[in-house]
Amino acid sequence: MGQVSFSNSLSRCFEMDCRRKAAFDRAAGSSDEFGRESIGLCRKRDEAIGTAAERLNSPQRAQPKALRKLALSLNNAGQLRFGVDYTQEGHIPEWAVEREKILVVDDEEAIREVVSTLLDAQGYRCTVCANGLIALEAFGNDSFDLVLSDIVMPEMDGIRLLSELRAQDPDVPVIMVTAMHDISIALEAIRAGAYDYILKPFEKDQLHLSVRRALEHRQLVLENRTYQSDLEHLVAERTQQLSIALQDLEQSYDYTLEALGGALDAKDAETEGHCQRVTAFTITMARLMGVDKGLMRHIARGAFLHDIGKMGIPDSILRKPGPLTAEEREIMRTHCGIGFAVLKRIPFLKDAAEIVLTHQECYDGSGYPRGLKGEQIPLGARIFAVADTLDAMISDRPYRKAMPITVAREEIRRYSGRQFDPRVVEVFLSQPDSVWLELHDKVGDPFRLAQLEHV
């Protein structure tokens, strides 16, 4: 900005100063202290501007120094309380320091000028508007930290303006400044969302206190929202990390189960693959019956480990090619209790252990080891009983070839209500043969329990 541009700016400053002095003179009648304070600020600015203007008559090379002193004088006089920079080219730049912005709305020019000048002196940046419509337009074109508004104004009154401002940005506090000493009006403003209510004439300290409290309230609201947002983000992030950790832990559990299943297959090679197939059948029926996903995982683990207790049965009995004696059959029946004793000590297999213990129970109470009946038998064990019979009949055995699935269907139907739960039998029979044959042929090594999510 050169000398001419700066002189024009100085002229505008004088013109604004004169208008404000006139407003101060009119306002001084309503509050002596208010008027004296405002006029005092104005006189300081007069002296600063006048002193700096005289320096502009100095030689050209001394003008930058005069401009710098003008900026310093204005700042020291309290016109604007923030630092002024000055470029080497002699330009006075835009005021660069961010200040809280306040929108002052009043139809009386004197009040607008006085309020804005007092707030300017406190370091705030004010925009003044003569009515609600103009203020609403200014609010839409800029962002403000606080609004001070009269109530009785032409075009749009303060209550309606308050409602419009709250709709656009409910976080911006609005202070109503009015001469109406009517409690009903004050209550209406507070109900509509006003932060505070100031009556005219008011002391400058009252104005400063109300403005400071409103801005502090806004700051707390914004900080709280930021804190909540950061906290929600942190919780979501930690929840995701925990979910991943739980998935990894659960997968490690399944790896352990697969290793146990592999050990069982090595001991009883005649039924290799049986655990995988019967688990697939069990999960398919459970899903068709609408079993909860969490329970389904326990059922899957119980089905997969149903014969784990056979690791405690002597090989002479387990691998005997001929029929078992009565004594050997009693020993074989203990595999349910052995498996239960092994698994119940493992927390994540506690529910699966119940299925291992009861997988040889019959619906009519003729099974073992406890002779449970009907609903006394866990649902997973009742579903497993059908799946186990199906796989045993349609799979090859050393002593016989696999039977047709039609034979297995008829056998399961015939023992419904005796060995099997009729509801489970109904679900099994509702599916075509192709479903079970496909599962029988598809499931094999390498096998993962996680595959059952897609069975």
Image (spheres, rainbow, N blue to C red):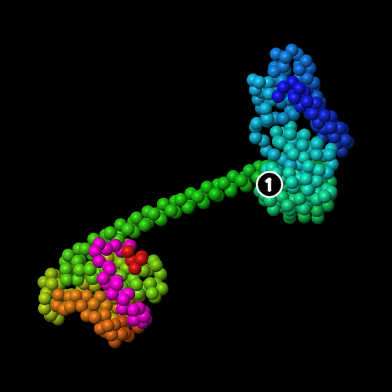
Give the magenta-colored segment's residue range: 423-450
Residue occupying image coordinates x 39% and y 67%: 293
Position above or below: 386 against 230: below
Q: Amino acid at mark 1?
A: Val
- Residue 243 % position (x, y): 41, 56
Q: Position of residue 137 (x, y in %)?
A: 74, 46
Where on the picture, by quarter, is residue 103?
top right
Q: Report the magenta stretch's main SS.
A: helix
Of helix, strand and loop, which one carries label 1? loop
Q: Residue at x 16, y 78 (%)?
A: 400
Residue 325 visible in the snapshot? yes
Q: Residue at x 76, y 19 (%)?
A: 52
- Regarding residue 351, the answer to whether it shows in the image is no
* Residue 248 horizontal side relative to residue 72, left or right: left
In the picture, which quadrant includes the C terminus? bottom left
Q: Which residue is mark 1?
A: 172
**Lateral position of residue 204 relative to residue 348, left or right:** right
Quarter of the image where one finds residue 212: top right
Residue placed farthest to the bottom in the image? Answer: 414
Query: Residue 214 vs residue 304: left or right?
Result: right
Q: Nearer the viewer, residue 35 or 131?
A: 131
For label 1, the crowd category at 10 Å Cα-Cα, with few meaning under 14, some 14 to 19 and many 20 or more, is: many
Residue in front for this viewpoint, 450 or 334: 450
Count the marks: how many? Answer: 1
In this rendering, the answer to whether 331 lies above or below 209 is: below
